[in-house]
Amino acid sequence: MIEIFKTNVNSKRQSDRILKILKKIFPNASFIFDLEDCDKILRADDVEIMQIVTIQNEIMNLGFACEILEE
């Protein structure tokens, strides 16, 4: 499953930190930030529905906003 999240992550340093944590928790998933997009999106590939809340919580626990981007 692919999920797209809207965030307020602004820098590569911040995104690298988040990606490192997410990759540790979900080693089989793929994560990519697009900080050039106005919604600072995080694309998560190969995630299960049950993992979506965990991804959001991990990012919010680091002090960032994270919500599913509605199409």
Image (tube, grey):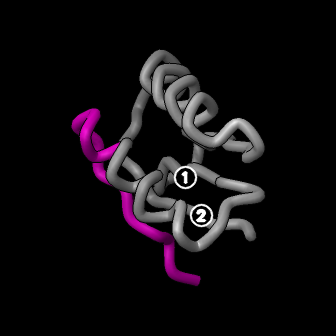
Q: Look at the numbered disc 2 and give the secondary structure of its residue.
A: strand
Residue at 29% of width from left, 51% of height from top?
65
Q: Nearer the viewer, residue 24 or 56?
A: 24
- The amino acid sitting under disc 2 is Ile
Quarter of the C terminus within the rendering: bottom right
Q: Position of residue 66 (x, y in %)?
A: 36, 55
- The amino acid sitting under disc 1 is Ile
Q: Position of residue 39 (x, y in %)?
A: 47, 56
Residue at 51% of width from left, 60% of height from top?
5
Q: Nearer the viewer, residue 1 or 11?
A: 1
Q: Nearer the viewer, residue 23 or 10?
A: 23
Mark linked to residue 4: 2
Mark-to-mark CA distance, 2 and 1: 7 Å
Question: Are the residues tagged 2 and 1 within 8 Å (C-beta)?
Answer: yes
Q: Look at the numbered disc 1 and give the secondary structure of its residue.
A: strand
What residue is pinned by disc 1? 41
Q: Is residue 34 above or below residue 51?
A: above
Q: Which residues are magenta?
A: 59-71
Mark linked to residue 49: none
